[in-house]
Amino acid sequence: MPFDEQVGDPIEDDLEINDDEFFDDEDERDYAPRAHPVACQTTESLKAFHQQRGTTGEDFRLRILKILDFMQSQAMNTALFLHHLCWNTPEIITDARCKYERTSVTHSKELKGVLRNLYRPPRGHGRGVRSRGAVEAMTEVAQEIVTRQVNYEMRALHPIMEAKPADFREESLLQITLDDMISRVRAAAPTWWSICSNAAFTPKQAARNTKKSSPDTAILMVTSIVSFSRSVRRCKMQQLMSAYLKSCGLKARAFDTLHALYFCMSQKTVYTAVDTIAETTQERMKADVKDYPIRGSHDNINIRFQAYEQRTDNKSHFDSGTAATVYPVKDPDAVPPNAAAYHEKRAAGSQNSITPLDIFELESQASPRIHTRAVYQIIRFLIDSAPFDLSTYEHKESELFKPPPPVHQLPTGPEHALCQYMLGTIHQEEASYEGNERCMHEWLRQLGLDTVENMKHISQEQLIVWMGDQLTSSRFRGLKNFRSQDLNSAQRFEFLIELAGWFHAQINLGFSFHHQYYGKPGTMGLKHAIDLLERKNLATPSVQGTFHHNLDELLHHVAEAHFRDAWCTIANVDSLDELRSRTPQELSKLASKLWEKLASTHALDKLCEKTNEAADDYFQQAVMFNRDILDYLELDDAIKTGDVGRVRDLLPRLLFRFLGGGHTNYVIEMLELIQALECEWPEDLKVWVLKYCWLGNTTGRPGCFSPFDLIQEHNIRDIKHIFAVFGPYATWEYIKKISAAIPTMRKVKDHVEADINHFRRGKTHTKPAKEIDVAKLQQAYAASKIHVFDPTRPRLDIECLTDYLQQGSNPTLLRKTINRWTARRVTARSTEQDWTDYVALAAASIACNTHTNHPATSTLGDNLGGDECPTSSNMHHDD
């Protein structure tokens, strides 16, 4: 099949060169169904007549001999008779009597048996030469018949396989399912499907492989290939495979190779399709932005650009940019917060800062719920352990083993899956105030909201919650403070609500545990566990690579080993399997006792009261770790399950820990968040932030919630790795151009893999079993008796006993911290709405942008700041 010189696709046979795909002597009416002819009824009557008369085989032989004798007398034989009767003599074709008799043959039920016997005559004995019959002639005719039938069925597949070659739309791609295509192709082309099925499976295979997957998928792909070779417009499966292979990072040369085999579209078509997907996604995003309230997030992205031919202006280097995502809220029950009520509440609430007493009151209110969850977590350590073996435990269905009711559970289900649109990645750093301002104006431009009318409406009547890491949050907060006296609400960024994401808070919480409990090899701290388990690259905290993941796993394993040993100690048993004889009520009481004696602040206070001679530092350190790690696990579980009420309950304790550990940036984030929730946000904004701005669920499945800053990190991972751009065209301009297509490509990739590989491979790696590591740690803790008070043990360094929670909850330190934070907050904000200069500068900015190809570095925000626009050189971190 020749290729189109321009796009490399098959020539459009049936449309471009007027090929109707019929044979020269073929008429489509040949295949139209007809009624049962009268001649066949005569045949049935004659059969009934002979049955009634009891005509025997010998009688039929004699009758046939008479007919043959008569034919011989007429200089005819059976071959000539059939030749002339079957449309080879014009006079006989039109003769009514001959037409009648011919019809009785062609439509009779006996014809199949006659043809079958002609092709393979039955043998009347077990040896001798088999009669060849009409094998050669019938094989040749059968090939012609099958060829015509397959050609007819291929024409019938046109509407099934048809698609516009350049129409790569998300909706059309995701609507293609293998089961639907297989059923439709099988129904439209039964002969072709039967041929392919018999070619793919031998009869013995079909009988033997009853549990093996059928070759239906392979037959469908073969059908799509041969159909695509007929017409470039029969490319539905090729489009799906092209989008999937592109999302998997297939190289251009591989695309050309597979396209030559008609398996997918050409690489030029695919690359054009990605651009089309990005454009249509942006159009759909702008439409959703007009119809629904939105949230957003952004973060920095560092990309290595590889130069294969180095020049002065072309060298390998790392470069920084910013990637962003917007999330429309399509929940029909969602009520956007009232901007006027927020500004009024904030103006009044900012004059009354929270006090240490307010924070202690919040902690007191949340403490019973946190205690209940802590006891449940202690029970979970027991029932989830391999030695206890809950599956065979007599009372495994006990209500005491079920989790406590949620505080504020986010809904799940497909209808609650997160909708997200990736904005075009830009070559603009976001570490400075100026960089964040430029980024925000660029995002508004991409969303189609940068006109003066839109900015007036948004800044006065809407609120946009923007999420990121702690640096992003602090930069926006500082930017708003410096702009607090600007001329209008748009310049003051009054529409923006900045939030620090919980993923980065978890990272810093892990750092806090690393600083507090790392210790030395002999102190039974994290250093001891790292050496015992031979874990690598955990000595120094880092935000790069897999440090957080590795530290998080280590903390979970150490916590599990701690509490397994604590269970054995508190129950006075040698192994957890001995507790299987206890009732759930007894286990619940033991869990409460364990918390009170080995994992509570009350137990620590008693230990601190002891004199130096009666102290046991190892025991005190173990109790302190048990108490603190329960809060860490509670936050992690609350985030994964989507219970934002439990996350809110932990705010005072997180503040105490960050303050006691010297994490000043997150001290300010916690204070700002508590101040907003308790003093400055109206009720509708509180509900909005808790329900829609802390956690998102990209699948809608229970237990699959993630912080928005983690979702943003996943999008950055896709840009840098999964959907990475390589080669000389890997530029910021091209990355920006195709960023919007990534969510669609991700959906197509998941859709195809779920449709084809759902029984072969999952999306995540199988985690190695942890039981050996946990048991090894538990054995070490049991040998050291860290949960048994022994004042004869040597003392530890004072750093090993530093209680971050106690230090951070010190009223004097807390009061001083709040006072310093309050003194630096900007509470007086202008309410002026002067848009005169804004309109003039906007017009100048638009005129400027028409002559530049770099909108990210020449935006409306560059001009609207005036001479007082803060930059990274003249502004300082607000922390």
Image (cartoon, rainbow, N blue to C red):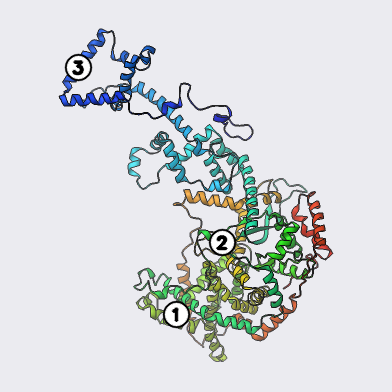
Give the amino acid at mark 3.
Arg
Residue 380, x across and y down, in percent: 45, 73
* Category of crowding for the residue at label 2, using alpha-carbon neighbours closer than 10 angstroms: few (below 14), some (14–19), many (at least 20): few
Name the N-terminal-most of marks 3 and 1: 3
**Which residue is tagged 1?**
591
Give the amino acid at mark 1.
Ala
Q: What is the quadrant of residue 493 in the picture?
A: bottom right
Q: Nearer the viewer, mark 1 or mark 2?
A: 2
**Which residue is tagged 2?**
332
Name the element at disc 1: helix
- Residue at image location 55% in from the left, 42% down from the top: 239
- Residue at image location 82% in from the left, 58% down from the top: 840
Name the N-terminal-most of marks 1 and 2: 2
* Category of crowding for the residue at label 3, using alpha-carbon neighbours closer than 10 angstroms: few (below 14), some (14–19), many (at least 20): few
Q: What is the quadrant of residue 250 in the picture?
A: top right
Nearer the observer, 36 or 617: 36
